[in-house]
Image (cartoon, grey):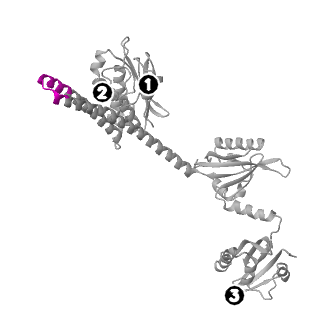
Amino acid sequence: MREINHTYWVWSVENKEISIHPKFLESIGYSKPEITAGNFWNYLMTPDDLPVFHQKIEALVEDPDSREFVHFSTYTHQDESQPLKISGEQLGEDLIAGHIEFIGNNLTDKDGYLMSLLMKHMPHSIFFKDRKSRFIRINQTCAKKFGLDAPEDAVGKTDFDFFEKEHAAEALKDELYVMETGNPIIDKIEKEVFSDDTKSVKWASTSKIPMFGVGGEIIGTFGITRDITNYKKQQDELKETIDIITHQNNRFQNFAHIVSHNLRNHAGNISMIMSLMELMDNEEEKDELLVQLNTASERLNETIEDLNEIVDVQSKTDLEMKPVSVCRVFEKVKDILSTEIFVNNVEFDVSIPEDFEIDYNPSYMESILLNLVSNAIKYRDPDRTPTVKINLSHKSEGPVLTVSDNGQGIDLDKYGDDLFGMYKTFHGNSNSKGIGLYLTKNQVESLGGSIHVESIPDKGTTFTVYFGS
C-alpha cells in the first residue's frame, strides 16, 4: 500500500496548516488537494486516539517546559491496520515539527516501546538477572525500592548489595533452582530486610522465571515483585482480631455453660424445696427443708460470687501497673497460708532475688502466687513431705516464674485440655472448686502473658508463668 513508511511534518498552529511530503500522502491514499491539521490527523489515526493527541499538542504549546511528545496510534485503511508512532517538538512559539513512522509488521520496535512502557510505569518491581544472579536491568519502581538514582545503577549488583544476608541467600537459592530446573517460582511470599541504615522490613510476593537465550539455553532469570507489606499487616491484624474473638467466644461459652447448667441446677433445687414446703404440714419437716433451702441459697450465692470475680478479672482494662517485688509478695502469700503450711509441714525451696521487680498489677501477682502455692499444698502426696520449689529468672522472653511440687500430679493426656477450665476438678478433694487455675490463667493472659503446665502422675507438677516482655 505504501512506498514510504515514514516522513516529517511541520504544523503552523496559528494558521492551522500542516506540511507533509506528497509521496507520503500518496502512499497512505490521501488525495485531498488541500490539507489542514484538523482533517489530516482525523484521517491518519483512530478517533479514540485523537483527544489524547490534541491534549499533547496543547500541552506542548501552553507549557514552556514541555518541549516534545510521543504518541502511538493505529492507522486503518481498507481493512488493513498498522501501528503508528508520532513524535513532535516545539520549534518556536507557533511552530511544531515532528516525525511520523509506521512501525511495520516487525514487532521489534513496537515491543521495545511496550517494554519501555512496562519498565517505566509498572507499579511493581521488574528485574532481569544473568546466570550469576547479577542485575542486568531493573525498572524505575525497583530502582526506587533500592534507593538508586537510576535503574542503570543496579547493573552488575546482586541482592547482597541491597538486602540482609539471610534474604539475599534465600533469593539466590531460588534463582539457582529456577536456572537448574527450568521451573518458575510463582508468588512466593518473602520477608525482605534491607541492609541500609534503616534496616527496614517489607513483605513481598515474588515470581521468578527462567530466561532463555536464542538457542534455547537458560541464560538467567527475570521476574516481578509486588509489595504486599500493607496487605500482610492487614492479614496479621485480621488474624489477631480473629484470635481475640475466638478467645472471647470460648470465655463466653464457659459462662453460658455456668448459666445454663450450674445456675439452673441451683434454681431447680430451690424451686423443688419450695414446692415440698407447700405440701408439708409437719413443722419439723418444714424446718429441715428450711435448712436445706438455706444451704442451697448459700451455694447459689457462692456461684454468683465466683462469676462476679471472673467478670471482674476479664473486664478490667485499666489495671494499675507498677514495679512489684515478687519476693515480698511471696512472703505475704506464705503468711496467708501459714496455717496450712504449718499443719502439713510444707518445705520450700525458693530462688527469688530480693531485688527482682516486675512491672505488674500487685493484686494479680498475689492472686497468681496464692493460687499456685495453695494448689501445690492442696494436692500434696500424703506419703511424702510436701516440697514446693519456686524460681524466678530473666529469660529472652522476659521474666519467668516456675512453681513446682512433688504432689499427686495429673494425667495431662487425659485431663490436659480441661486443666484451666472453670469448675474443672480432677482429684476429688472436697475443698476443690475448680476456679483457681481458671482465674490464674485469665489474670496472666489479660496482662499479655501465658501459663503452661508439666505434670507426671504420682511425681508432681510444674507451672511456668511467662509474664511477657
Tell me the kind of residue under disc 1.
Answer: Tyr
Rendered image: mark on residue 415: 1
User: Considering the numbered disc 2 on the image, is that residue within a helix, a strand or a loop?
Assistant: helix
Q: Which residue is mark 3?
A: 14
| Residue 362 visible within the image | no
Residue located 77% across and 72% down the image: 84
Rendered image: mark on residue 26: none
Badge 1, how many Cα within 10 Å: few under 14, some, many 20+?
Answer: few
Mark 3 or mark 2: whose residue is earlier in sequence: 3
Mark 3 or mark 1: whose residue is earlier in sequence: 3
Q: Which residue is mark 2?
A: 332
User: Considering the numbered disc 1 on the image, is that residue within a helix, a strand or a loop?
Assistant: helix
Query: In the image, which is nearer the foreground, mark 3 or mark 2?
Result: 3
Instruction: Tell me if residue 429 is in the magenta stretch.
Output: no
Tell me the kind of residue under disc 2.
Answer: Lys
Badge 3, how many Cα within 10 Å: few under 14, some, many 20+?
Answer: few
Residue located 78% across and 76% down the image: 99
Mark 2 or mark 1: whose residue is earlier in sequence: 2
User: Considering the numbered disc 3 on the image, is that residue within a helix, a strand or a loop?
Assistant: loop
Report, in whole angstroms, how far the alpha carbon at label 2 lies from the one at label 1: 31 Å
Asked if the residues shown at circle 3 and circle 1 are in contact, with their CB atoms under 8 angstroms apart, the answer is: no
**Front residue (pair 322, 433):** 433
| 294 horizontally vs 182: left or right | left
Residue located 85% across and 78% down the image: 27
Where residue 429 appears, as percent x and y from the top left, is 33, 20
Asked if the residues shown at circle 3 and circle 2 are in contact, with their CB atoms under 8 angstroms apart, the answer is: no
Report, in whole angstroms, how far the alpha carbon at label 3 lies from the one at label 2: 97 Å
Report, in whole angstroms, how far the alpha carbon at label 3 lies from the one at label 1: 93 Å
Where residue 107 appears, as percent x and y from the top left, is 81, 63
| 409 horizontally vs 39: left or right | left
Query: In the image, which is nearer the foreground, mark 2 or mark 1?
Result: 1
Q: Residue furthest top?
A: 383
